[in-house]
Image: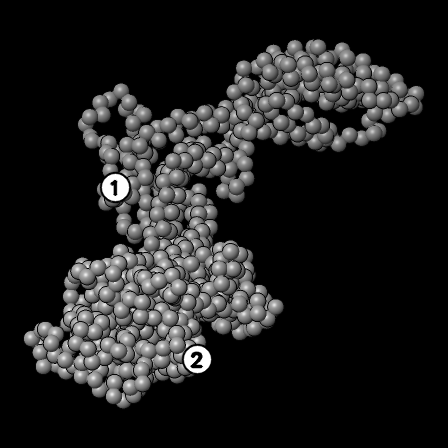
Amino acid sequence: MPRVFLRFLSATKTTAVSFSFTSSLLHSLPFHSLPNFLIFLISILISFPSIETLEFHFLMAEDSPCSTQLIDGNGNFNVECLDNFVRTTKLADCGLSYAVVAIMGPQSSGKSTLLNHLFHTNFREMDAFRGRSQTTKGIWLAKCVGIEPFTIAMDLEGTDGRERGEDDTAFEKQSALFALAIADIVLINMWCHDIGREQAANKPLLKTVFQVMMRLFSPRKTTLLFVIRDKTKTPFEYLEPILREDIQKIWDAVPKPEAHKSTPLSEFFNVEATALSSYEEKEEQFKEQVAELRQRFFHSISPGGLAGDRRGVVPASGFSFSAQQIWKVIKENKDLDLPAHKVMVATVRCEEIANEKLRRLSADKLICCRVGWLWRKVFKWVLSQGFGKLLSSILDTYLSEYDVETIYFDEGVRTAKRQHLESKALDFVHPAYSAMLGHLRSKALDSFKTRLEQLLNKGEAFAASVRTCYQSCMLEFDQGCADAAIRQANWDASKVREKLRRVIDAHTLSVRNAKLSEIIANYEKKLTVALIEPVESLFEVGSGDTWPSIRRLLKRETEAAVLELSNAIAGFELDQATSDTMVQNLRSYARNMLEKKAREEAGKVLIRMKERFSAVFNHDNDSMPRVWTGKEDIKTILKDAQSASLRLLSVMAAIRLDEKPDKIENLLFSSLMDRTVAVSSTRDRSIGASADPLASSTWEEVSPKDMLITPVQCKSLWRQFRAETEYVVTQAISAQEAHKRSNNWLPPPWAIAAMVILGFNEFMLLLKNPLYLLILFVVYLLSKALWVQMDIAGEFQHGAMAGIISLSSRFLPTVMNLLRRLAEEAQGRHTSEAPRPQQSLASQSFRHQTQQNPVSRSIPESSVSSNISSTDIDVEYSSPNLTHRRSTRTQDAEFS
């Protein structure tokens, strides 16, 4: 189980960056508990698409000594095998801590055997029992097992092989140049007995090495380690000087460029030599010597180590690409510029690493989406609290990883690519940053709206509330922007802040306008209530003091409303011009409202005139209804009523809110009242002698906008008014005449005097004979009873003929009723109300007769009333057209 877990950790090391975003989130959280660990494991699982990938990464964690063919015998570069080698051996993680050891030498000289024993590799070796033939074709790679630092063994195809022939040396030169360009240490395998020979097998090889070295522009210093095989009894101290002398001769004989004609060999190579015993004859001694030689390769790249100066070394992550490009240039038979090649490799590799980081950064977003609800539930508060720190941490993670992976590449290249990566990464996260600023802006705006509404509901001043809310919300927004700021970016949030300010100003203006409109509407409503009903009442009165009273009322109420309005809008801190405009608008509203009301009342002026005429004509000075008894002066009353109506017309003729004098009333009275009699009496005369002052559409000294009724309209209204009130006057006159007729039913005074004089003898006869007096008294009582029962006075009020007909139909029933009652009284019994039906019948007959009377139809109920009183009898009766009341007092003894 521990080994499995270690394998798992080893596998995840190669993909740790893929969930670095989740790791950075975990480190940014203030708690570390089981949920964090679960999130970590989920992120790891998301990073791997399948279980097979996990198994593949477990296999990668193991050291593999298997050799890989880098270049085949035909010179084809095996990119896939090299990439697989780099991936399985984790070469890319080494940075500059790696070394390359190449071996060259004649064919079948034991190169592969030496590498296998020296580095524990498994290169294919020649089977001596099957004969001597070519074993290694092309160039092979293998990881040196147990060597620190990471060391790559490169086995080159042997030279001077019969398979390629004597003339086919192109591949030898290409492979030699490739080894010198890549390897830090080049092992040259040579036989001991060839030392000192002019045509030995190692001299063509050295010539090839030195010749191709000239094709490298600014080559780095490489270590040439000559391995002398099958050492003889000759001491090594004697062999080494001879070997160096031969090498120097070869160097001097090689043609050089002009720039390197005098350059010594030591500028290009560190020449080292070692000797090994025969593997076949002295195997154990060979192995011991190889073991000693193996120790020299430990820490070979350290100062003083076996490797050269490593000036042109390429970081391990770019080894694959560098090898491909070097071989491509060599195949194209071009000169190899190692410094330029180093820059080119750095450019490509840094760009690849930067693109990989960008891809990883994009994948982190997908990881968050795949975590789903876990992201929303666990990290939601992180985004709102530490957005800038979170994104800065994420970007720092990727940029740090880039720095680590590109630290060994050319500084100028990696810096430029880092800036490009940072720019691309910022472009990638900029939408999130913009969205966060939008969220902060919306949040600040909502906060402003809420706080402003709360302060206004508490009754705070508008301007002070706006300032308080604006400062707090902008401070909150600035803090949010500072928290959302990304350390790697110098983004300016001023545009969003300015947009927030504009939105807040627009909302403030909207709320201010709404509040001001509400306040203005409130005071307009108060003005309407305070003015409409009093003004309407003043127009109903229609006196000469109507417009002065309206002006005083308008001034008083308007000034009060203006004062209250000024106090109400003081908290808005408006400029003087705006305040003056609002006050002026309120004054204009009050004036316009009165003008509108005046025009409305002017449309009802005829009705008002008739009401005024009726009030004055039908009521006395005490506002009591008039009773037309015949003593009233109808002509005078009519003139007063018409004057009052005409005065009302003059009041409604024009708007007089400005204290400007006019002559409307005088003109109407002089034209309509004073000329009424004259015009009616001279109707047949020509009226062209003098001009009509009312034959105009305007009033003098009155503005057209203030006119309500034109002079022509006044004349027309007055004509219509007279026509409609003439009937009332006629009814009054008829009522007076009817009252006179009702009070004149007795004989004239002269007739009464004649009766007294002529009846003197009869009067004296009655005095002399008292029995006649008793008979007369009984006749009087009977007559009085018949008078009351038959209402003779009432019957004759409607004419003599109608009275006679009514009395003749009621006389006999009334007499019989009186006799019956007298008989019952004489017997001492109370009678019931038997005569009532008769009386009702008589009343019905009376009503029927009076309804047929044409005179009574012309007298209305409201215009005529009569009172008739007596000292003996109290009887009420009514008819459709007349109401009478009589009062009598009857004594019970009279009916006994």
- Sequence order check, earlier mark of 1 and 2: 2
To which quarter of the image does residue 763 belong? top right
Asked if labels 2 and 1 touch by Cβ distance under 8 angstroms, the answer is no
Q: Is residue 142 left or right of residue 740?
A: left
Q: Secondary structure at mark 2?
A: helix
Mark 2 burial class by Cα count in 10 Å: few <14, some 14-19, many 20+: few
Distance of mark 1 from mark 2, alpha carbons? 138 Å
Q: Which residue is found at the position 83% from the left and 25% from the top?
A: 895
Using the image as rendered, state which of residue 625 and residue 703 is in the foreground. Answer: 703
Q: Which of the pair 356/594 is nearer the observer?
A: 356
- Name the secondary structure under disc 1: helix
Q: For residue 762, which quarter of the picture? A: top right
Q: Amino acid at mark 1?
A: Pro
Residue at the spot of label 1? 704
Q: Nearer the viewer, residue 787 or 710?
A: 710
Query: In the displayed structure, would residue 587 be above or below residue 673?
Result: below
For discs 1 and 2, the disc positioned in front in the rendered view: 2
Q: Position of residue 395 (x, y in %)?
A: 38, 68
The residue labelled by disc 2 is: 284
Residue at 12%, 79% (x, y): give it.
252
**Residue 378, how many percent across, how many down?**
54, 64
From this view, report whether residue 8 is shown above or below residue 611: below
Q: Give me the residue at 46% from left, 69% from top.
A: 63
On the image, the x and y values in percent for residue 316 come to: 34, 70
Colour basis: one colour
Could you tell me which quadrant the N terminus lies in? bottom right
Would you identify the image quadrant in which residue 476 lies?
bottom left
Q: Which mark is residue 457?
A: none
Quarter of the rendering occupied by the C terminus: top right
Q: Residue at x 27, y 50 (%)?
A: 660
Residue 667 in view, yes or no: yes
